[in-house]
Amino acid sequence: MVEERDRAIKYAHDNRARFLNELKEFASIPSVSTDPAHKGDIQKAAGWAAARLEALGMKNVQIFPTTGHPVVYGESMTAGEKAPVVLFYGHYDVQPAEPLELWESPAFEPTLRGDNLFARGVSDMKGQMLAGLFAIESIQKTSQLPCNLKFIFEGEEEIGSPNLAPFIASHKDLLSSDVVLNLDSGIIAEDFPSITVALRGLAYFEIRVSGPTSDLHSGMFGGVVHNPAQVLCELIAGMHDDQGRVTLPGYYDRVRPLTDEERADMKRLPMDDKHFLRITGAPALYGEAGYTSAERVGARPTLEVNGLLSGFTGEGSKTVLPAKAMAKISMRLVPDQDPAEVHQQLLKYMEKNAPPTVIWEVIQMAGGFASIVDRNTPGVQALADAFQTVWGKPVGFKREGGSIPVVAQMQSILGKASILAGFGLPDDNLHAPNEKLHLPTWYRGIDVVIHFLFNL
């Protein structure tokens, strides 16, 4: 098997120039899922991905329609019944490129500058998708695949994967596997390989507070009518205590505590206070007392104000007492928290604290569960060993503060926790102008997937 690995690695290294050209071709398709004007480009990207699977000799390649954008599927079951089945997840859709004027080169004209390739979607996640496919090709062309393979590529990840859960639920047998590998992530730093073992969930709400039937003159009615903007600000201010803890009743009842092993692992990560100050530009840090910054951002639940709107916000002055106020509130949840329960906790908070001088409403906008994978499973260990072989150092296990809906969906529907990894870097400008992919790291990532499949 050592010789088979070496041949596959050599093939990957010898074909890097062609791999790069194929990535440029894929990234040049403006497959923006949120914009109806790009529906044809979405179809083109789905067709491109399906054709790439067929070129690899995958069987049963299909483009499944949904009520939104299509799902691409393919498989190779040639490794035998005793070999593990690996389900590769990917998404071929991308974020909009706007504001276009901030790009140093056109967003859908992949441009090489130094060691980086710049284009929308090149890191999130077309490059990551192709890292897996190129690793498989490198094995195929030099030996036999050691694992059975399945692929599911969607076109709606950037809009919350609204049609993926129904597709997974209606195709459970087709998607059955032993291991799910999702490369829609990255590593902490160029010299610090890492695997994401947990993602936070999400509960998103809009809070509306209203008082008088219309805006009022603040001189004539201020002091008589309770100002909805003031009420909303006071309600929001009361949602945290002086220790940075969320005050919604029962909010921490289901929060799974960190183990000593997890805290030790997170302490190893190069994510100290200086790291967060440097990348945010904030004058000082804030958060729940008793936890490090890495723990707060990845392993503790939060409540954040995402937007506020009320009254007069134009140039100059206008003495108005606004009739209504609105806030967008998001909560990042950790394993065992339930978005539906959090909704009820928010309602109880409002019922207890909102004064009778206003009318209020809470609108639930979105929700999703957190996910976590056991780092001691064979799949995670196979990937950790692969990273160590390529990077020459132990991998770090990290918890991500964000949410990826498909990870929790697969865990709840298929009963499989996804192994979440990837080869992007924190400064890849995901969702922003001048998105990039660091090619030396990407090439090493292809090698990692080769070793992973042999390890498994």
Image: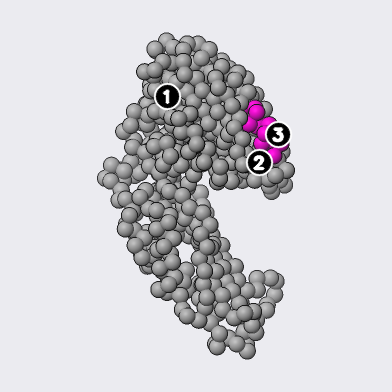
The amino acid marked with disc number 1 is: Val
Residue on which the image places disc 3: 109
User: Distance from label 1 to label 2 (Cα)?
Assistant: 31 Å
Q: Is residue 441 visible?
A: no
Residue on which the image places disc 2: 32
Q: Is residue 420 visible?
A: yes
Tag 2 secondary structure? loop
Locate residue 366, reporting x and y percent.
51, 54
User: Is-magenta flag for residue 155?
Assistant: no
Q: Is residue 333 above or below residue 5?
A: below
Q: In the picture, which quadrant includes the C terminus?
A: top left
Q: Residue at x 56, y 75 (%)?
A: 210
The amino acid marked with disc number 3 is: Glu
- Judged left or right of residue 252, residue 24 is right
Our reading of the magenta stretch's main secondary structure is helix
Locate residue 160, reporting x and y percent.
55, 46
For the record, the magenta segment spans 39-49
Q: How many marks?
A: 3
